Image (cartoon, rainbow, N blue to C red):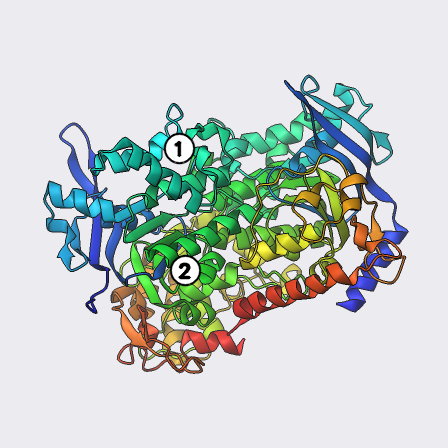
Amino acid sequence: MSDEPLLSVTDLEKHYPITEGLLRRQTGTVRAVDGVSFDVARGESVGLVGESGCGKSTTALSVLRLEEPTGGAVRFDGEDVLNYDDEELRRFRRRAQLVLQDPDSAFNPRQTVGEAIEEPLRIHGLPNPERRRHVVEDTIEHVGLPADAADGYPHEFSGGERQRLALARALVLNPDLLIADEPVSALDGRTKSGVLELLARVQSRFDVAIVLISHDVDLVRRFCDRVAVMYLGRVVERGAVEDVLTNPAHPYTQSLVEAVPSLDPTAVASSPALRTDELPDATDLPDGCRFHPRCPAVIQPEGIDLPHEEWLGVTALRFRLANEWGDEADRRELLENGSTPSRETTDPSFETALRNAFDLPESDSTAESTLETAINALESGSLEAARRQLADGFASPCEEISPAELEVRVDGESATDATTRLVACHHYNDDISSGESSAPAENHSSK
Amino acid sequence: MTASETYSTLEVTMSKPLLTVENLRADIRMPDGVLSAVDGMDLTVTRGETVCLVGESGSGKSLTCDSITGLVSSRKIDVSGSVRFDGEALLEADEATLRTIRGNRIAYLFQNSHNALDPVYSIGNQIVEAITFHDDDPEPEPREQAIELLETVGLSRPGERVDSYPHELSQGMRQRVALAIALAADPDLLIADEPTSALDVTIQARILELLEQLKRERDLTVLLVTHDLRVVARLADRVVVMYAGQPVERGPVDAVFETPAHPYTQALFDSFTGTTQKTHEQPAATGCRFASECPHAVDDCRTERPAFEAVGTDETTSHQAACIYYRDGRDRSKVLERATGVATAADSLLEVSDGE
């Protein structure tokens, strides 16, 4: 056995063109997967976790070449998957299988499940029908159903049973790699944990490597050895599950973990400290770190050193102006709601209202002069000037430079054999965040 | 915890229940007999509290709600028992009465906001429709009300968004709009059926936050249906655990989560830590329905249906389980011993998720 991982994905890209008109001129690109790297060792389970739309399913399909990747490299057992010819691809697909979320649509309703499970065997060359039947029955028993289930039709089974049968079909060729895309998301309670347990048993028994794709942090925590957290087509953090999910380093991973409600009714409710819940337009992704418009820990530019709250106020104002400032309506609303308590007596000034609403600083002199100019510009109605002023004065490195994956070792990890994790965040790059005293992980724990 | 607990129990005992359900049954007529999908459900919801029905799919929790509001097809399902909503007997009420109560006094929030919203009308129109449907002479202007409601449910810039169409909004915003429609008639009771199950985890956190805030600020009364114990922990004041159409355990959320008493509740908690799975046994026809799957089942379990018994030593506690082991003279420690084990498993999970 070599040290090389079973599956090695490097800088995988899947871009979809957006075309318009009769000539199908390309007007844009959706970067569904944009430079994703991860490794899967033999027999281990790796979780891909992230919100819907982060590209985790597209990653799975691209790895199996069910979608043709537009860039990057996929190596399986030392071979270059992207250079496979048809015959090699067929052999590859025998060794790498896919299980999808919805077991209802995974089976042909007019076929018995036995026929469905048998099909891969027939295609991949087991000519003897009796032996095929034998293998099918054997596999069905392995997934915890009686052998005679083979003669049933899909509708005769419950959701959990159908998911077990879908798993049987994936396992019947004895694959080395199983990609499971939200395999238990359609199930609940004990049915869910049952299928999960089966996956774990299958993994140890058949020594199959599993890539588990899920939006459920708890599920990945329970099932996987390692995890890659994805956000808008990129991996933001990857490493051992225990490290990444109990002590997340990337601000996005932190938000994701905080968003999971506790099972303890007496626990203080945590909620993610995201600056906005809106995801950016998939065709027009933010520059730099893709998470920066939502990131609660966005880095201050050089020369500016505001207290954290005030800095967030400034970025909130910038964000608001850049995205959704309806001039008249917002100005009125601001004056009504954000003005000082003494508004009955004195005419509220626009500046005070704005400062109150966004919690703007008056402490830092560099910041102050920029702000002053911007507020004046806004008050005199030139939104563009205000925008520009703020953009120039408060440009964060997070929005300019795309963060590379860095090896990070977060202090206080108890496990001595903890693997170093990779984090794509400028907070861990001393060249960029030198002025910043605290990494987000420390912010997080000190709260 | 204890101070607020005493306060809330005090409040509960003082005010009279908004909704009382006694011995509710829903029998589905099947070609080969009758499936009793809700079997002897008892439930009280007091003003201002959140009661949660929890159980796996098929346990009858949604059907319980639909039976209460008369949303089941009488051609296929026989509903019997007693449902009193603010003094009105709902099962005996005619369709016209039910219609005024539904939406007006009892509002629904469903799992899937895609289905709840009409794609061809602006969200403002849909909220206005909900307002005017139940109020002929709305004051102030329905459109003003709609904007106000959108603000209540936390939609930024409601004045502009009121004219947008469902497809222009994100998943989380649509769920907020669905909630705004539910709140349009200022209902006494909100039935929320898996309100966050279809949502992404960060959006789920926001909707939970919003529901919590509405509970606090509007004193909203909620009957919550979910299979997710974490959602229960976050929102519920009291819990009713259902298995195969029957309530098996009920009580204040803290007590039930600290000491899950019924073997089924314990199994449900185990499923959140990954140590249990469903057997292929069908629910038993007589006696305790969980008997066919229960690790502690004895012969008596299969013959007689257990009544609710107090879980603790204090007979007046509202934490009760319908399990034979809690009867006088039985050794409840046999079941509870496992409960401590469950608590440890849950604790270890909590440690992990709360860990820094």
Q: Is residue B45 left or right of residue A140?
A: right
Residue B99 placement: quadrant: top right
Q: Is residue A230 left or right of residue B50?
A: left
Q: Is residue A170 visible?
A: yes
Q: Is residue B227 left or right of residue A70?
A: right
* Residue at 79% from the left image edge and 33% from the top image edge: B24
Residue A176 or residue B50, whichever sits in front: A176
In the image, what residue type sits under mark 2?
Arg
Q: Residues within 10 Å of mark 2 (few under 14, many from 20)?
A: many
Residue B64 or residue A381, whichever sits in front: B64
Chain letter for mark 1: A
Residue A140 or residue A94, whichever sits in front: A140
> Which residue is identified by label 1?
A105
Residue B255 placement: quadrant: bottom right
Q: Secondary structure at mark 1?
A: loop
Task: Please give the label number shown on residue A294.
Answer: 2
- Give the Cα separation between the discs numbered 2 and 1: 36 Å
Residue A253 coordinates in the image, percent (x, y):
42, 64
Task: Please give the label number shown on residue B106.
Answer: none
- Which label's residue is closer to the chain start, 2 or 1? 1
* Residue at 12% from the left image edge and 41% from the top image edge: A86
The reply to whether discs 2 and 1 touch (Cβ–Cβ < 8 Å) is: no
Q: Is residue A273 left or right of residue B346?
A: left
Q: Nearer the viewer, mark 2 or mark 1?
A: 1
In the image, what residue type sits under mark 1?
Ser
